[in-house]
Image (spheres, grey):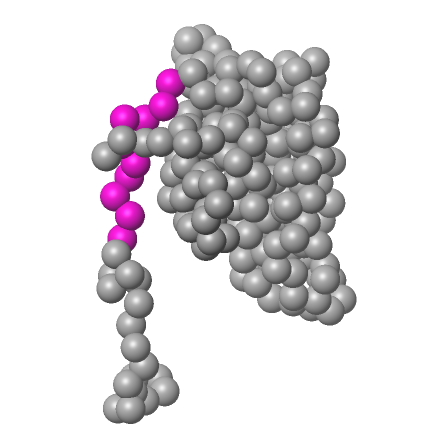
Amino acid sequence: MREPDAAAALPQDQEPFAVAQALIESRQNISPRHLVEPGPSKEQLDAMLSLAASAPDHGQLTPWRFVLVPTEQRHRLAEVFAASLVDRDPGATEAQVADAREKAHRAPLLLVAIASLGSREPDTPALERMVSMGAAIQNLLLGAHAMGFGTGLTSGRAMTSPHLRRLCGLDDGEVAVCCVNVGTVAKRKVASRVRPAATEILSVLGPESRPGGA
């Protein structure tokens, strides 16, 4: 299946659902290795964040935030990635440590997504807060895609590192979830991943169903 460009994926003069469907189905996760300049402007980033802010938010807690790591601060994130690797594997080679550092210098725009799961009022369950976080990230990704940018999410064990917690100034109850990478696509996947059919992700509650499986 050919992967259409973002602009080509948006039909003109069609129903809103068709436009939304084309946008959502054409989005791909792009490796940060393949995201190059130019990245989003400040105005474009602000617009993406306004879309993130439209995510469902039970209790209106805004249980998430983003930390921008600008180009001139990437060296600090690089050292966090390196230190996190050495903490996990004291025998890591120089090449492995260098590769860990290099991950901080890839996409033009890099955000660290932070979820707030600690005690709050009202005390919305942590799973609901993570749903809000996921919706916020998806809104941001789709906004970037509609602007013609590529996006990729990256994570890994460095997300739980105390080094990253200090760098991002995390409070008690906050956790780093992933990095959001945005830029111009230098290399796109040939085909999208195979997505499940509706019949594979939907079941129907029947009259014989009993609570607890009884």
Q: Quadrant of residue 66?
A: top right
User: Nearest the camera: 58 or 78?
Assistant: 58
The x and y percentages for residue 19 are 46, 47
Can I make out residue 105 in this image? no
List the single residue furthest toward the top.
Answer: 94
Q: Main secondary structure of the magenta part?
A: loop
The structure residue drawn at horizontal position 56% and vertical position 14%, both measured from the top left corner, is 37
Q: Which residues are magenta?
A: 187-196
User: Nearest the camera: 165 or 69?
Assistant: 69
The x and y percentages for residue 174 are 66, 47
Q: Give the position of the C terminus as an image quadrant.
A: bottom left
The structure residue drawn at horizontal position 45% and vertical position 8%, both measured from the top left corner, is 94
The x and y percentages for residue 134 are 53, 50
Q: Is residue 34 magenta?
A: no
Horizontal side of 135 relative to 63 (left or right) equals: left
The image shows residue 181, relative to residue 170, as above or below, that is above
User: Nearest the camera: 138 or 76?
Assistant: 138
